[in-house]
Image (tube, rainbow, N blue to C red):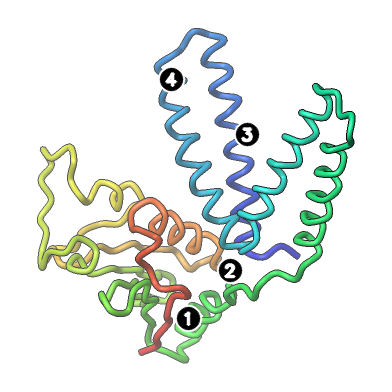
Amino acid sequence: MQSDIEILITLLEEEITFVEQCIKDNVDESEYMHAHIHTKALTQLNTQLLILQRLNDPLYNKKAELDMQLRMYKKFEKNNSDIDGYYEKMIAETTKKLNKLNDADKMPKYDDQKLDDAIFSIRDGRNNGFILYLNVNDNLGFTFELPQPDVLTISIDVKSALNVEYFYGDDEENESPLNKFNGLEFKLNQTGNKLIYKYSMIHFKDAIAIKTLLSRIIYDIFTYAELDKPATLVYF
């Protein structure tokens, strides 16, 4: 059974394939502006995919490096007279290293069921809510609450997200720091100190959609290298 992160990787790979086809169609139809837009989207998707692949498999980078070397040696062997068997030897050695990594046990992954369990705990009334801290020292985290039986709110303090006490959006600002949050359907509250996302719990079965949302925030808005690994979950 695929883990949630493996499902996300599969979905991203499918989206990348779709965007690649869009670019090809754009070029064939001389729609170069659309091709440019799709190319920018493809770059972002490939970056997200690489991050998820690294999270899913700590050995991913090394495997990718060996795989690139292997393809290079095979290409050189095909195009050159390998009198002393050098490339054949390098192919064998690299293949052995790659197979060893593929056969190695992966390092323990985070328990991606914890978020599901936490949401079920507040839905069932065992906890009032919880905070998922991305960086404890900076108090950067998302607060999950259930103010209504069928509505889950996910909020983040403006101070921790934007480093200001309050924020009042300016509709004329093209480069508003809220744009990326607004694009993910987070709304600023009336007092301007929280960004809030509302999620329907009517047909809730698992947290895959919420994890996808959080992944987009982590990799599109925040600097992943500056976040805690793993995140910290605190009930209240």
As drawn, the label of residue 99 is none
| Nearer to us: label 3 or label 2 | 3
Dots 1 and 4: beta carbons under 8 Å? no
Q: Which residue in the protein does label 3 denote?
A: 17
* Residue at numbered disc 4: 34
- Residue appearing at x 43%, y 82% in the figure: 233
Q: Residue placed at 33% from the left, 58% from the top?
A: 222
Q: Bin the neighbour count of mark 1 within 10 Å (Cα to Cα): few under 14, some 14-19, many 20 and up.
A: many
Seen from the viewer's position, the closer of residues 236 and 226 is: 226
Residue 181 coordinates in the image, percent (x, y): 30, 53
User: Quick check: 236 above or below 91?
Assistant: below
Query: In what quadrant of the picture does the C terminus appear?
Result: bottom left
Q: Which residue is mark 1?
A: 123
**Label 3 close to label 2 by CB (< 8 Å):** no
- Amino acid tagged 3: Thr
Please give the residue where the numbered disc 2 appears in the rendered image: 206
Q: Residue at x 82, y 49 (%)?
A: 95
Q: 141 or 205: which is nearer to us?
A: 141
The residue located at (58%, 68%) in the rendering is: 206
Where is residue 117? Give x, y as percent: 55, 81
Q: Which quadrant would residue 194 be assigned to in this image?
A: bottom left
Front residue of 229 and 158: 229
Closest to the observer: 144 or 88? 88
User: Residue 230: percent from the left, percent from the top?
Assistant: 47, 75
Identity of the amino acid at label 2? Asp
Query: Which label's residue is closer to the chain start, 3 or 1?
Result: 3
